[in-house]
Amino acid sequence: MDGMVPLQKQLLDYTASLFQEGYLDDQFNQLQELQDESNPDFVVEVVTLFFEDADRLLNELSKALVQESIDFRRLDAHVHQLKGSSSSIGAQRVQRVCISFRNCCQEQNIEGCLKSLQQVKHEYSLVKTKLETLFKMEEEVVAGRG
C-alpha cells in the first residue's frame, strides 16, 4: 500500500499547483464535490463537454475573424459562451482572456480580437493539457488502489 502514497501525494501537489498558477479556481472544487460513488466520472464528463464546446467555439471564432466583414455581435456571442463554459469548470485563465476579448469585440478592434483569439487558444491548450494530465494521474491512483 505505501507504494501508492507517493502517487497520491503527486496528485495532490499537481492539483494544488493548478490552483496556485491560476489555471483553476474554486468552481473546479465545487465540481469535484458533486462527484460521488453514484457518479464517479462526473468531473471528467463535464470537462470533456467543455473541451468539445471550446473546440467548436474556437473554430467558429477563427472562421468569423477571417470574414470580409466581421460580425462583431456574433463574435461577442461566441466569446460570451466560451467565457461561460470556461467559468463553469473553473478554467479561470481562459475566462480572463475572454473578458478582454469581449472588450475588443465591443470596440470592434480587429487587431485586439486576433490577439485575444491567440491568447485564448494558448490558455485553452495549456489548461486542456493540464486537466488531461490530472485525469491520468487520478486514474493511476484509482487503479493502484484496486
Image (cartoon, rainbow, N blue to C red):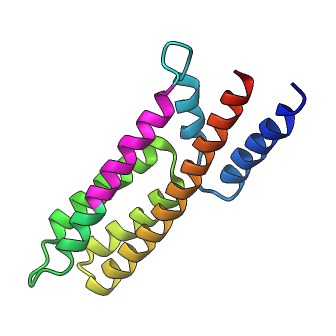
Q: Is residue 32 above or below residue 39?
A: below
**Residue at 87% from the left image edge and 33% from the top image edge:** 3
Task: Specify start and end residues of the magenta stretch as a single range.
Answer: 41-57
Residue lying farthest right? 2
Residue at image position (59%, 46%) is 25
Image-based side of 34 in relation to 100, left or right: right
Compared across the picture, whether 62 is left or right of 92 comes to: left
How many circles with numbers are drawn on the protein?
Answer: 0
Q: Where is residue 54, by image quadrant? A: bottom left
Residue 107, picture quadrant? bottom left
Residue 124 against residue 53 in the figure, above or below: below
Nearer the observer, 32 or 76: 32
Give the prevailing secondary structure in the magenta stretch: helix
Residue 51 in magenta stretch: yes
Residue 97 at what x, y percent from top left?
Answer: 45, 66
Describe residue 104's horizontal placement relative to residue 119 as left or right: left
Residue drawn at point x = 37 percent, y = 54 percent? 83
Residue 145, placed above or below residue 88: above
The verdict on residue 42 being magenta is: yes
Residue that sits furthest to the left in the current view: 69
Report x, y in % for residue 129.
Answer: 54, 57
Q: Is residue 92 above or below residue 41?
A: below
Locate the N terminus by quadrant.
Answer: top right
Q: Nearer the viewer, residue 36 or 25?
A: 36
Q: Position of residue 104 (x, y in %)?
A: 32, 75
Query: x%, y% of residue 44?
Result: 48, 36
Q: Nearer the viewer, residue 86 or 100?
A: 86
Q: Residue at x 71, y 33 (%)?
A: 141
